[in-house]
Structure formats: structure tokens, C-alpha cells
Amino acid sequence: MTAAAARAVRILRRLAGMAATLLVTSFLVFSSLFLAPGDPASFLVKGRSAGPEELAEIRRQYGFDEPFLVRYWHWLEGVLHGDLGRSYLLHQDVSSVIWSRLPASLLLIGVSALMIAVFGIGSGIVGALRRGSRTDRSLMLLVTVGAAAPAFVAALLLRSVLGVHLGWFPTIGNGTGLLDRLHHVVLPAAALSVTFMALVARVTRSAMLDELRREHVEVALSRGTPRATVIRRHVLRNALGPIVTVSALLVSGMLVSTAIVETAFGMSGVGSLLVQSVDQLDFQVVQAIVLLVVAAFVVVNALVDLVHPLIDPRLAAAGSAR
């Protein structure tokens, strides 16, 4: 099989697997409404007493009286056309509600991803190149502390020290304008990325050390090839596979982790919307956000698999040889 044919088959397999995963996930997400205790119609009356006639009208209006599979098909058909339903509490289209909150969450995730790339990968590379030194031991100590620090603990510490005590950064809200938004998002992004930076640093250091022990690296150094060239061409490039995989999957899962950070810093993002919707039993919004998170995770996972052969040509050669 040629390399082009192997690549096409690989892409088709990934697309088919991604579609099947999203279909199963959509069914599970929709079924979650029926796993919740109580009658969904009773949630919409907001705790007040309602007679059987009123509850029956609510069930008819929202389609609760239809068979489960019929409701699922109608919901799935709407999702495929971009209609995620209507919020029970806000009385707005769910897509518009999420879209209004999404920019704040994307900015938070983007800044956090940048911090992970710079500090997480950077510290892992430095630790591997200076293995056993005081710098390496200090970085590993920080990594251990960071990996053990939950996001809410990091949020409280950063907000208390850098926000309230020193006054360097604002501690609540989204801000207005690009620069002000970036100023507001620094502390939440740092709190969100602390644990992820530690994990990426560990993976980077381990992958770099594995490549440094390779025979071809020792041969290249013994032949007088500059160390910087060997590190760049033979060590870092070959170590990028696990680094990119772990980093991408962590970043794709950040949408759930934003719930804690956005709530702690009073940000109006998708994460805080999820917490609010769960608390107020707004199932349509919860279903849409969960489906969005799973879709992001599946898409990023598929993209990582497709990009891997470009990062490591050995994978492409192995695939074409089958």
C-alpha cells in the first residue's frame, strides 16, 4: 500500500470512529435527562405547586409525552442543524446562550495553553538537559507541588496573593477590551494551567531523557556534531510525539476544568454557565455543553492521531509498510 493510500485509509477510519463516538455520546448525553430523579415537568414550575392539567400541558409543550426514541431523534436532528434546543430557565436558544459565553472560555483556554507550552514544555526540556543538577531538582520540586495543587487551591492562592494583597491583577470579571480582558485572564489562566503544566513538564522531561539515551544520539555527539543541533534534530523532534499528544488532550479537556476557575474569579464563561445550569436543573444547556466538551475531546484526539505521522516520519513509514 502506498503512503498516500495508507494516509487516506487512516483518515477515513478516524472519521468513522469519530462519528460513531459522537453518536453514542449524544445518545448517552440525551439519556441523562431521564436518569435524573423526578419528573422533568416539575422542574419547570420552579418548586411551586402545579395541578395535573398544568403539568400535562408542560409535558405536551416540551414534548415530554413523546416516546424516548422519538424525542432523541428530534433532538439529534436539531443538533445536526445547529439547533441545541431552548433553555428552560433563560427562554433563549441554547446555541446563542453558549455562543455569548464561549469567547471568554476560549480566551482563558488559549492563554492557559500558551502557559503550558512555554512553562510546561520549557521546564521539562531544561530539566532533561540538566539532569541531576540543582536546576533539575528545583524544577522537579515545583512540578511535584504543581501536580498536587488542585485548580481551586491555586485559584485561592493566586487571587489572595497576586490579586488582593499585591494588587497586580484584577480578581473578578471578564474585563472590557482586548488588553483589559488579557489582564483579567492572567490569574484564572495560571490557576487553570498549574496542574497541566506540571504534567506536561514530567512527560517532556521523560520523553527527552528517553531520546537522549538513544544510540544514534551518542553516535552523532561522538562524531563532533554540535550538541544544539543534535538536541534539535534528533532529540526534541523525536520526543514531540508524546509531548504533543498529552498537551493536546489536556488542553481539549480544559473546558470542563474552567468551571471551577471561572466560578472562583467570577468570569462569565461556559464553565460557570455549566455550574449555573446544573444548579438550576437547566437540562438543555447542560446537555449541549457536555456534548460540546466531548466533541472537542474527540476532534482533538483525531487530529493528534493524524498529525503524529507528520511529527514522527517513522510512524508514516510503518503505516505504509503494512
Image (cartoon, rainbow, N blue to C red):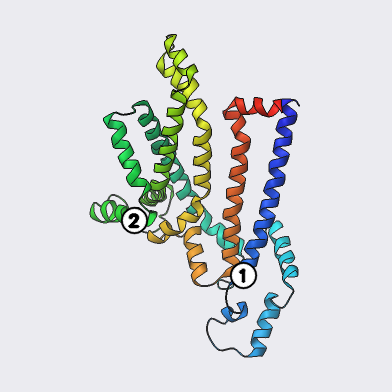
Q: CA distance from mark 1 to mark 2?
A: 32 Å
Left or right placement of residue 20 versus residue 114 in this view? right
Residue located farthest toward the top when viewing the structure as drawn: 223
Q: In this rendering, is residue 127 above or below 281?
A: above
Seen at 46% across and 59% down, the residue is: 259
Query: At 54% from the left edge and 59% from the top edge, which residue is drawn?
Result: 100
| Quadrant showing the C terminus | top right
The quarter of the picture where residue 44 lies is bottom right
- As helix, strand or loop, the secondary structure at mark 1 comes to helix
Label drawn at residue 209: none
**Residue 123 visible in rendering:** yes
262 left or right, relative to 94 = left
Residue at 29 percent across and 31 percent down: it is 135
User: Which residue carries the number 1 mark?
Assistant: 33
Foreground: 85 or 170? 85
- The residue type indicated by label 1 comes to Leu
- Quadrant of the rendered structure where residue 45 is? bottom right
**Secondary structure of residue under mark 2:** helix
Q: Which mark is residue 153?
A: 2
Q: Residue furthest left?
A: 165
Answer above or below: position of 62 versus 306: below
Q: Is residue 321 above or below residue 55?
A: above
Rendered location of residue 102, percent (x, y):
53, 55
Is residue 23 positioned above or below 140 on the image?
Answer: below
Image quadrant containing the N terminus: top right
Q: Residue at x 64, y 62 (%)?
A: 28
Between disc 1 and disc 2, whose residue precedes?
Answer: 1
Residue kind at label 2, given as amino acid type: Val
Q: Position of residue 101 (x, y in %)?
A: 51, 58
Query: Can you see residue 85?
Result: no
